[in-house]
Image (cartoon, helix red, strand yellow):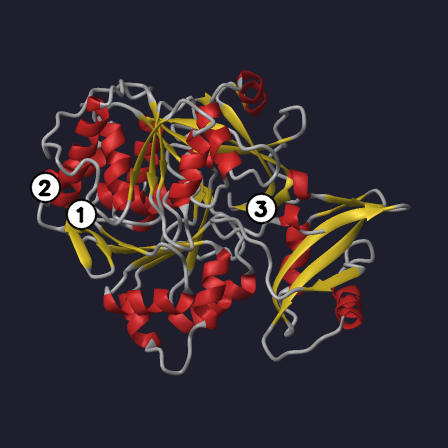
Amino acid sequence: MTDRHLAGLLENSAKRYPDRTAVVFGDTRSTYAQINGAANQVANLLVEHGVQPGDRVALSCPNLPLFPIIYFGILKAGAIVVPLNVLLKTREVACHLEDSGAVAYLAFEGTADLPVGDTAREAVDRTDVALVVFGAGPAPWSQQSPVFETVERDDDDTAVVLYTSGTTGQPKGAELRHRNMHFTAVAGRAMYGLDAEEPDTFLCALPLFHAFGQTVIQNAAFAFGGTVVLMPRFDAESAITLMLREKVTYFAGVPTMYWGLLGALTPDVPVAELAANLRVAAAGGAALPAQVHKNFQDRFGVTILEGYGLSETSAISSFSVSGEEPRVGSIGKPIAGVEMKLVDDHWNEIPAGDPGAIGEIAIKGPNIMKCYHGRPEATAEAIRDGWFRSGDLAKKGDDGYYVIVDRSKDMIIRGGYNVYPRELEEVLITHPAVSLVAVIGVPHDSHGEEIKAVIVREPGVDATEDELVAWGREQLAAYKYPRLVEFRDALPLTSTGKILKRELS
């Protein structure tokens, strides 16, 4: 097996630390030897069903011990993992199966509130994919041998196909090589100070089917013999309970999760105990509001380290530099081995020395995907000479730290002026009545677009639309402040906790 075969993350830890706890779920604790043996059973089942090296095998499973078991079982068989969002509907699952060319589909049977099994059955009726459904009963592979010799794959072979979230259009399958995923998994040694001799305990509330959860938690933990505590769905109060019970040292989440944790800190919560255990707090997926960063630092005594990446970059491209003064709102510097630059619409690099200049982030390094599956034109548009265009607009400071301004497709053009929603959101969330906010552009006859703020109010705090508009006028330039304000009880979120702006209007 090659040094960078992704299955090696599990196998090597199983050899070195067979009795160490790999996964915790509820009252169930599974060792590395147990997870590895079960993954071998999955691999044997797949080979028995005719799965060949290089075949694509889809997987729908929430954050259960079964996810890493099947994930690594597919890799051991030499096949390619196609993790699917468990919230997808029948039509969407069928489209992903067809687009990926999957030959088999392993799907969780589901529960009353998450009927993945029913969706899977309906989806495969539209395809020729072989379906294997698993759930609370004996696993379909339980009678297989727990011994399996991992199928060799080249470092440049595809290991995982991750479908982009589709927040800006049709989801595309990013093909990630074994070496891409392996690189970002072991990057945790430098970024977070991971050490196999003093293993960390990771709380995994991020969905494992997404790049962030897979790489920054599951794969990073397995690379260094850590323990992964699984949560199928994030709930702030339950998360705090688990953090205390399991003495969690590492938490990674999106901004809405940190916002939730802060809101769940009642007087009964022993915050000092939480803080004493917590060693690393990492944020990604979206820019972290400065106020959330400050409040978490004040309450937990832990500085949130911000990073940046996409499915196409194996989840990580840049991160806060350990030991340096944190730059609140920054996504950090490129991680070791990765290059970043700002480019214009024609791929021309934004000249250095102008810290105020805005450009699109382009990324180059061993983390960059091979291609978009079956989409050569989209691949050629996104990658040139090894550089990947992210679609995110940013500024680069004199200190080398990058700051996201916004997604290029989220930018609002009002009366000929470029308005970046992220900047407005950072200001609006500091208002005492604002708990969560998303700024969007809506059509306008004379201005082209008008600026609208969709706001979730703080509990028990009242404010009118006119008051928020007037306050925004005081805080922001005349062309920036939102003329329209709408209050909602909640904002629509993707399965990974990002605000789904395309569902706002």
Residue at 62%, 59% in the rendered image: 426
Q: How many angstroms separate mark 2 from mark 3 (CA)?
A: 41 Å
Q: Is residue 281 above or below residue 378?
A: below
Q: Which residue is mark 2?
A: 16
Amino acid of disc 2: Arg
Name, please, the residue furthest toward the bottom.
267
Residue 76 seen in the figure? yes
Q: Which residue is mark 3?
A: 404
Residue at 67%, 43% in the rendered image: 410
Q: Do tag 2 and tag 1 residues touch (Cβ < 8 Å)?
A: yes
Tag 3: Cα neighbours inside 10 Å, few (<14), some, or many (≥20)? many
Q: Which residue is mark 1?
A: 196
Label 3 sits on a secondary structure element that is strand
Q: Looking at the image, tell me whether mark 2 or mark 1 is earlier in sequence order.
A: 2
- Horizontal side of 112 relative to 78 (left or right) equals right
Query: Which of 135 and 374 lies nearest the eye of the viewer?
Result: 135
Tag 1: Cα neighbours inside 10 Å, few (<14), some, or many (≥20)? some
Query: Which of 123 and 494 lies nearest the eye of the viewer?
Result: 123
Q: Position of residue 488 (x, y in %)?
A: 66, 64
Amino acid of disc 1: Ala
Label 2 sits on a secondary structure element that is helix
Circle 2 or circle 3, nearest the eye: 2
Q: Looking at the image, tell me whether mark 1 or mark 3 is earlier in sequence order.
A: 1
Residue at 29%, 65% in the rendered image: 242
Circle on res. 248 = none
Amino acid of disc 3: Ile
Q: Looking at the image, tell me whether mark 2 or mark 3 is earlier in sequence order.
A: 2
Q: Do tag 1 and tag 3 residues touch (Cβ < 8 Å)?
A: no
